[in-house]
Image (spheres, rainbow, N blue to C red):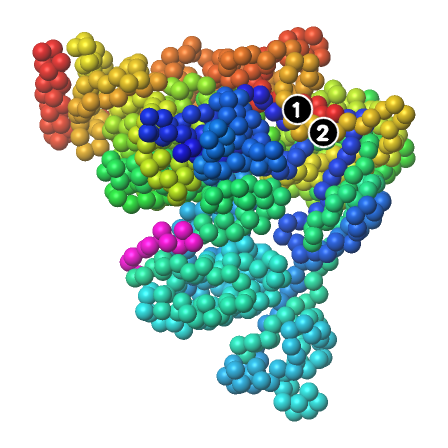
Amino acid sequence: MPHYPEQRLISRLTVVQRDVLLPELTTGAVETMLDKRVDIRDVIARGIRPGYHTLVDVARYFNKPPDRADQLALVKAGDVVEQITPIAGRNPERGKRLFAPVPGRVAYVGGGLIVIEQKPEVTTLEAGLRGIVTAIHSGRGATVETTGAALQGVWGNGRRTAAALRLEPETGIESTFEDEIDLKYMGVIIVTRRKLSRFTLEAIADIGFGGVVAPSMDYTLIDLAMSIAKPIMLTEGFGSISMNRAMLSGLADLEGQHVLLDAYLPRAGDHRRPEVIVNAQARQGETPSRPNVMLTLRPGLNVRITREPYVGQSGQVVNLLKSPILVDNGLRLPCAQITLAGGETVTVPIANLEVIGR
Amino acid sequence: MSILAIDFGSIHTRAVLLDRIDGVYQLVARAETRTTNGFPVQDLSVGFDRVLRDISAATGRTFTGPAGLLITPENVDRAGVDLFVATASVSRPLRTIIVGLMREYSAESARRAASGTYADIVASIHLDDGRTTEERLNAIIDAQPDVIVVAGGVDGGSKAALSETLALIRMAVSVIDKARRPVVVYAGNGSVIEDVQAAFKDLCEVLIARNVRPTIEDEQLANARAQLTRAFDRHQERQGKAFASITSMAASGVIPTAQGYSTVVQYLGQRSRENVLALDIGSAASTAALWVDGALHTAIRTDIGLGHSAPRLLDVVGVEALRRWLPFYIRRVDLMNYVANKSLRPMTVPAELRETYLEHALLRTGGRALITSTGVATRDFPTIIAAGAGLTATGDPSYTAMLALDIAQPVGVSRLLSDPFALIPALGAAAIAKPEAVVQVLDGSNLEMLGTAFSLAGKPSPDRPAMHVSIRLSDGRSVKHAVDGGHIWLYALPLGETADVRVQAGRSGSFGKARRLHVKAEGGIVGLIFDARGRPLEPASTPEARAKQMPQWILEATDAPMIDIPVRWLKPELGEDKDDAPAGEPSGARKTRGRRGKRGKVQQEEADDALKELRDATLS
């Protein structure tokens, strides 16, 4: 049976097609249309998160049974009320009346109760990339398509920014902010080859980087990373993993360019990944590639190894072994032979190979 | 009559083709691919096409017409299939709110009913939860539920408190946006059903189940679970593109994968009148289905899994429980990094020794937690079925058998079966339309028979004879062996063969109620497994001791070359918190001096007599 490997893009020119959607549980309205050209900050949809609901006990206030109390309601579901709006009573102008305790929208009237929803939280969903709307997802968002470079990571802290990208100096990211941040790095998305430390994360939070791309960090720092308002993307994973050579090379090619860093926080079964995207048009004679849905593992493909003992290394498939073989750990697994960038040929379980997507 | 069944797991999409051969349903072909619900495509039909193509290649049959749609029923050219069924565990679990009157009774029963489907309990509301009505209202709205399970009151009991609770739920559902309104599953006092239907009419869908607590002593979960399965089906229908094309083709919609385990375990249990255990440890969710003393018990846990749910599994079992299954020191942070990476790349497999032990520690502790959550205490499982790639895709059936024993920890005699091709979910789905297919496929040799295990309870003395085994083969030859305490012995009795096996427990062990066994045992891919490690199975208390013990177990169970634990792994690494201290002795592992009193002496004499009898029997 053919093996369809995981794909992760490290591509200089590809068709980037992204579903830009509100979270599944958010109620929203789409504010764009098919074939519309959108920019990074354009609003695709607005989502509404319910506000706090205040319960007003009309029956108790008037000392009436619920059905009688309902007859005293001066408002109905959907009405907007201010803090001084009378909401129940025989007469809205005089006599014993009950006033709205909070401003908001009447959500429910019945059973001797009135429920007022305070101001709901409205979130806006931005396009995140410059492109054309190719599909509308009712109530959720749209699909935006563009061409350009795309480099996908594995984890992000849920933030996004557009800024110039720079590689850290040879002396490391820490040398850019010894006393104060080197102006050259102010506001830029900085790429570090080293794992993120608590010290570096705290510095990112305090000083003027636009965002950070790093290979790895310890999982114990996840709460700190999530609390930082600037985007952080990991390219390899958690622990002490060096940056994959192809990824570093791809990022180095973008040095100085204005990029979008979408440090998307991945969820189970999610189509979307954290990534760095640069809009670029194909030059004459160039055809941007599309991710190949039916791509099977075969000799000649460039791959990245995703588990120990070769985690993070790139190589090329030279042979797919016909039957499972006994691996060093005592398990018998379907494997491929991979020639690493250094020339060594190693045997790796095929489940631990990611094709460096086009 | 051909049946095509496809199971969409969170990692793998597996297909099986069943067809009648000589009047009996059999597995004809199978295929497996990665589930296509992530980059670069989020459409399950792509994976569906892939497995169909593979099955076509294997059988020479076609399944789809020119428009790419499945041909049903099968035509005269044998193109297409008569029945297509689909199961899934891939979609997001149901966000579930549990509502009951009393926390320990109705709310707890509703929670247990919800554990029979892929449910995440996002809030629990009951009279003694300490919240005001306003707080309860906001808790329901904020939780954004897919389903609200309402229980409470005994049949014919007081309605007052229940009516108040129903009014609260009605109010909460009313203020939720129409497109997002949950399904209400009512499983409370039967005398208010009409009130419930009237209250939620035109508001949201209501599914009525029989009361989970018809009396205070009685708990009835089956009907509520069936209604929750319907709610899960509705939920999947709303999943959009990913499920749309599959749902439209499948005869009964898309059924929860776990339902197959319940169906098959119930069938096997009723037929054999013995206990049955099936375990499916997946990436995002895991299922245990147990038939015990004539009753079905299931647990579906979305917080136990080896891939997507690995970080939640670590939360469930705790760092110390995992360390007890590791033959080396490990820092807490390294464990956390491991599980986090597993959730980022759930389809990967361990390729080096340290990670293999980590993976199997997750499997063993998660599997135990899963069984424990069913509330069943017995270890008497004459049939054990292992499923899920973590258990079945080790590439070595002996390894699979050992892991299944470590998780199930049975006592006595157990037939060990494995389901590497996801036949059980398929049979569960097919059972609705073709129950005879389930019977015939299970009666045939379609599940992998690993072998028969003999497992000792108690704490056998290490390295002293704990099981005396006599095997009489069908050709009249006999084999005898003494298995030392703390060890496993394998006898390769081939698949399809049986042997007359007598086993006598040594001084400090037993097989449950019996101390000796005499059975006709089936062989298998692995053969006969004699497990004298005792129950509950507790690995040694220090990493140094486990570094000797665990590779030895693997050697004994698999007959593969022993892989020693490197000495450098046995140096405690200084960590950043007190949890990084090495695992201490497990609380249950206190050593007791073997002071043999009068009772012990009598038992020993009985055992010696039995051993003598056994010797005589096997020599004659």
- Does the stretch in magenta take in B522? no
Residue B168 at x, y percent in the picture: 51, 68
Residue A277 at x, y percent in the picture: 80, 34
Residue occupying the point 66% across, 35% down:
B41
Where is A148 relative to B530, above or below? below
Where is A62 relative to A121, above or below? below
The label on residue A291 is 2
Residue occupying the point 66% across, 79% down:
A75
Residue at the disc numbered 1: A295
Could you tell me which chain the residue with mark 2 belongs to? A
Where is A53 relative to A354, above or below? below
Residue B126 at x, y percent in the picture: 45, 62
Q: In front here: B409 or B584?
A: B409
- Does the stretch in magenta take in B220? yes
Mark 2: few/some/many CA within 10 Å (<14, 14-19, 20+):
some
Tag 1: amino acid: Leu
Span of residues in magenta: B216-227
> Dividing the image into 4 quarters, which one contains the C terminus of chain B?
top left
Could you tell me which chain the residue with mark 1 belongs to? A
Tag 2: amino acid: Pro
